[in-house]
Amino acid sequence: MKSKEVNKKMSLVKMENIHKWYGKVQALKGVNFDIYPGEIVGLIGDNGAGKSTLIKILSGVLPKNKGKIYWEGEEVNISSVKEARKLGIETVYQDQAVIGCLSVAQNIFMGRQPVKTWGPIKVLDKDKMRREAKKLTKDLKLHISSPDQEVRFCSGGEVQGVAISRAMYFKAKLVILDEPTTALAVSGVQKVLSFITRLKDEGIASIFVTHNLHHVYSVADRFVVLSRGRKVADVKKKDTSIDDLTKFQLRKEAIVT
């Protein structure tokens, strides 16, 4: 499938000199980060590197203490998850992507359910939820028997697919995936990687947050490496290797700003 034409000259997101403190502990130390439309960026680093803090600031979960964020060239203040979603930022967290006891359709539309109105009366449009969920899961080739199937009966890869289909339906411009391949079998990993490639085909940018270099290396266009709250590398895939990226994670000082 040919990727959609997008304006890649202007960054979709630009984060400048981002600082974050938790009391006396500084989690981020002047981090610069950007991503362009349709680009897949691998955000990597060991535990405590600052990856989760950075994406939580971008997704509206945490406030930054210092720095600026630009969205499509304009400075923005992302003060909540709702504000992030209005811009077109969807985040798929490893342990919060879906609710197992709810159906596939309910998970896709969670928090944004369509309604039908009869005068002052509003009711959930369950038929539309089922219909749209069926289209989405079929389009992503998810092996789900029905949009009414509870997500807890889906495989790990399919669970991530349900969360990603939600982002696609609501026209996200940027999808942040937090450790999307953790604890998945080989088949599940391959399915998730194909979903991420599909996002790129649709012109949707992705930030792939992970500590598994082998998974992210196969799909990312560029890598940003954090270590102890600092950005220590920002390199294109063609200019690096898995061995190089492993070494970057051990650095204390930035080599690319």
Image (tube, rainbow, N blue to C red):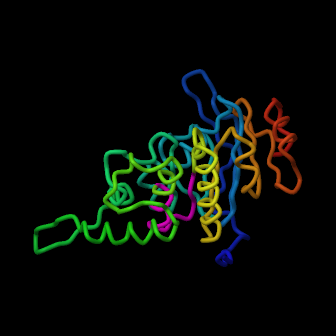
Residue 84 relative to residue 224: left or right: left
- Name the residue: 61% across, 51% down: 187
- The vertical placement of 87 against 228, above or below, is below
Residue 238 x %, y % = 87, 57
User: Which region is colored magenta?
Assistant: 163-176
- The vertical placement of 135 against 47, above or below, is below
Location of residue 192 (image quadrant): bottom right
Residue 140 relative to residue 131: left or right: right
Location of residue 184 (image quadrant): top right
Residue 160 x %, y % = 51, 52
User: Of residues 55 and 238, which is closer to you in this image?
Assistant: 238
- The vertical placement of 180 against 90, above or below, is above
- Name the residue: 64% across, 47% down: 186
User: Of residues 168 and 13, which is closer to you in this image?
Assistant: 168
**In magenta stretch: residue 215:** no
Residue 229 relative to residue 82: left or right: right
User: Of residues 106 and 238, which is closer to you in this image?
Assistant: 106
Residue 49 x %, y % = 68, 32
Label count reads 0
State which quarter of the image contains the N terminus. Answer: bottom right
Residue 149 x %, y % = 34, 56
- Name the residue: 82% across, 55% down: 236
- The vertical placement of 87 against 47, above or below, is below
Which residue is outermost to the top? 24
